[in-house]
Amino acid sequence: MTDEQRRKLIENKKDKPEKTSGTASGNAGTNYVLRAGRKGLNDAKENVNETGTPIVTKKTKRKGFRPALAIFLILLIGAGILLYSYLTNKVYKSAAGTIGNTAGNLYNGGLFCENSGRIYFSNPNDDYTLYSMNLQFGDYKKLYDDYARYINVDENYVFYVRQNNMKKKADKNPFVLYSTGVFRVRKNGSNLQMISKKPSGSLLLYDNKLYYQIAEDSKLSLHRIDIDKENDQEILNDDTQVVSVFDGRLYYAGKLSEKNVHYLNSNGNQNIAVETEAYLPIAMEEGIFYISPQNGYNIYLADYEDNERKNIVKHLCSWYNITSDGRYLFYNCDEKDDSAIYMLDRESNEEVKILDGNYKWLNIAGGYCFFFDFYSERCYAYDYANRKLNAFDPPVK
């Protein structure tokens, strides 16, 4: 073979493809798998240190982070739910000795109560449902659609007696319409809680306890319960309102056995404060004010120590109230030839006739005496410092 023949033979071998099994695409797939396998093996080798411990790369971190994040979020949501439930059900107590409303207001139905720059009241234009407003008769807020009586307020809550059976307007929910009892709601109107579902009379908040009348077996009795609904017990079996507090004692006028002025100690023991028949006693610093049925339903003041009695108002009175400082005394005169509501300025001893007629529910709050026409229940607000009378006509929210 010549050199020229040998050269052509070598060139023909270079141009001819090698024999392989399968198609070209099959070869490509096989080569891809082999390449991927080699790459995975190399990556695995790179992710193992000299001791044989796997090395955590960004990719492995990302894969492990996702389930951990999901578990963290679930735990966070669960903790939030538990915290919300705890804060919702937690009962906040007020300062020791806090009194929810004045005795004079509570004797007059407890329709108004002043607390921390606001007045909480039963709106006569909205079927006596629970509202609040500022001292300038603005910023009206409807707290709850309940016919509210005996309103008491502390740092955190509004306590009241629900009397929805007294509503004039029909309610879509009959269970709400005819339900009664003692209730607690936050001052913004949220988180309503039932303290007692029994038909109730008067209500007093004192020292984080509620003193309330309940009607059972055609009689009224006085119960005491903590504001967190614990330790409910009967403490007095007498058909009387216990709403007046002074110097740690609760004063009341007996109705059944002894018709004297009594007081209850914190342990529930009863004692006689004034031996006289009395009506609506209000215990204050200078003594005990009361209406005397024995003396023409005049208003008297009895001293604590020697029970010396002084005639303050010489009119037949059915309703009365007095400001917390004891200066202004309001009363409705029911005499035949002189039916009117009066104010007595005890500092100047001046008697002021406010308005002729028959009136009821005298409540004092925010520098005003609120009172209602006996028949029409039209409400008035009397500014006693400036001697100005206006109709009280709150909006309906």
Image: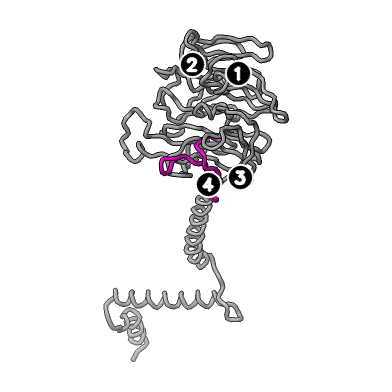
Q: Earlier in the sequence, mark 3 or mark 1?
A: 3
Mark 4: secondary structure = strand
Q: Which mark is residue 234?
A: 4
Q: Which of the pair 361/255 is nearer the observer?
A: 255
Asked if marks 1 and 4 touch (Cβ < 8 Å), the reply is no
Q: Is residue 218 left or right of residue 235?
A: left
Q: Residue at x 50, y 35 (%)?
A: 202
Q: Nearer the viewer, mark 2 or mark 3?
A: 3
Q: Quadrant where the C terminus lies?
A: top left
Label 3: how many Cα within 10 Å (few below 14, some 14–19, many 20+): some
The residue carrying mark 1 is 329
Q: Amino acid at mark 4?
A: Glu
Give the distance between the C-alpha atoms of the residues marked 3 and 4, in whole angstroms.
Answer: 10 Å
Q: Which of the pair 310/134 is nearer the observer?
A: 310
The residue carrying mark 3 is 268
Q: Amino acid at mark 3?
A: Gly
Q: Amino acid at mark 2?
A: Tyr
The residue carrying mark 2 is 380
